[in-house]
Every structure is written in C-alpha cells, then in structure tokens.
C-alpha cells in the first residue's frame, strides 16, 4: 500500500467541489489516510511550492493558494502516486483527458482544482508539512461492531 498527498485548491473548495472530488478519489480505489481543511499562510505556501520558486507563475500561484481555505489529505492505494497523477490529469485543464479531475473541475492552469504529489519523496515531504505522524494511520481491517486494536510496536 503506497501513500500520496493531495490538496483541493481554494476555488474548488469554495465552490463545494470537495464532495465530488473525494467521490472520484474513492471510486478510483483511494482510501483516505488523513484529511483536514487548512488556510495556508504565505510562509506555508512558499514551503509547499518552494520547488517552483523563480518560475513566471510562482507569485501568482502563491497569491491564489493563500486566497482561501483548502483541503489537504493523505491518500492510500497500491501505486498511489502514479495512479493519482493520472486521475488528476494535465496541469492545464484544457489539455487534460476526459474524466480527469482537472478536466471536470479545473478552470485554468492556476485554478486547476487539485494538486497531487509527483513522487513518493515529495508525497512524504508534503504530507509532513500538514500531518503529524499520529494523524496518519494505516488501514487495519475495520469490522463494524467488532473492535480491532492497533498493534503497538
Ligand atoms: P500543482 O499541481 O499545484 O503544482 C504547481 C502548480 O503551479 C500547478 O499545479 C499549477 O497550478 C501551477 N502552474 C504550473 N504551470 C503553470 C502555468 N504555466 N501558469 C499558471 N500556473 C501554473
């Protein structure tokens, strides 16, 4: 089981697209390992998008990303990183394939509804910005009405 990191950007959150987007993630087989809403500060946005510093779109991207709350999450599935990138689609919604999240819910390259990590290393780094270790959990065979205790190491 691999983990990846995703976030729902300010416009998509504001327009109540969180439910439809999570539904697409769940339908594609992703389990939610951790989730919360968050309003990025300028400093946090610069940490998250540091690899894009100096690119022409960088400052506008930061301005947009701090403009309202977002939803951040850890998603789990075999091949989670690659499969989520495929489901999310091209950065530019106009170039994204039919059925992808950005084709369905994105407006343009900046307001493209979601972000998804591009590698397991970045997924780990981005998750760690928002979630403490104890906020993330491994699925452990939930059976309703019967208690499954977490195995302590
Ligand atoms: P995201 O997956 O969040 O990672 C970096 C973001 O930079 C990307 O999605 C886009 O929103 C944004 N971005 C990348 N290229 C461009 C561009 N050419 N114009 C505007 N924004 C861009």
Image: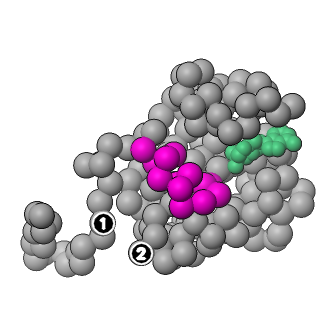
Q: Nearer the viewer, residue 69 or 44?
A: 44
**Extreme-top residue of the structure:** 42
State the extent of the magenta-drawn residues as a range: 116-128
Q: Quadrant of residue 46?
A: top right
Residue 8 x/y as whole percent: 59, 47
Distance between mark 2 and mark 1 Cα atoms: 9 Å
Residue 90 x/y as whole percent: 80, 60
Q: Quadrant of the N terminus?
A: bottom left
Position of 7 compared to 38: left or right? right
**Extreme-right residue of the structure:** 94
Task: Tell me if I can see residue 130 in this picture.
Answer: yes
Q: Which residue is mark 1?
A: 138
Above or below 41: residue 145:
below
Q: What element does badge 1 sit on?
A: loop
- Labels 2 and 1: the sequence-earlier one: 2
- Residue 1 - label: 2
Above or below 95: residue 68:
above
Q: Residue at x 60, y 55 (%)?
A: 117
Q: Are marks 2 and 1 in contact (CB under 8 Å)?
A: yes
Residue 148 x/y as whole percent: 12, 73
Ligand 1 shows up in which quadrant of the image? top right
Residue count near mark 2 (Cα–Cα under 10 Å), binned few <14, some 14–19, many ≥20: few
Q: Residue at x 83, y 55 (%)?
A: 93
């Amino acid at each position: 089981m691999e983990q990846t990191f995703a976030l729902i950007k300010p416009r998509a959150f504001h327009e109540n697209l969180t439910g439809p987007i999570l539904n697409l993630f769940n339908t594609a087989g992703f389990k939610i390992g951790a989730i919360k809403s968050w309003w990025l500060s300028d400093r946090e946005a610069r940490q998250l998008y540091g690899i894009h510093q100096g690119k022409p779109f960088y400052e506008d991207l930061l301005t947009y990303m701090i403009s309202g709350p977002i939803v951040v999450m850890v998603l789990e599935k075999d091949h989670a990183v690659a499969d989520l990138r495929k489901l999310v689609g091209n950065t530019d919604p106009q170039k994204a394939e039919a059925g992808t999240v950005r084709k369905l819910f994105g407006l343009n390259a900046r307001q493209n509804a979601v972000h998804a990590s591009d590698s397991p290393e970045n997924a780990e780094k981005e998750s760690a910005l928002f979630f403490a270790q104890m906020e993330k959990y491994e699925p452990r065979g939930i059976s309703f009405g019967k208690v499954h205790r977490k195995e302590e190491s």
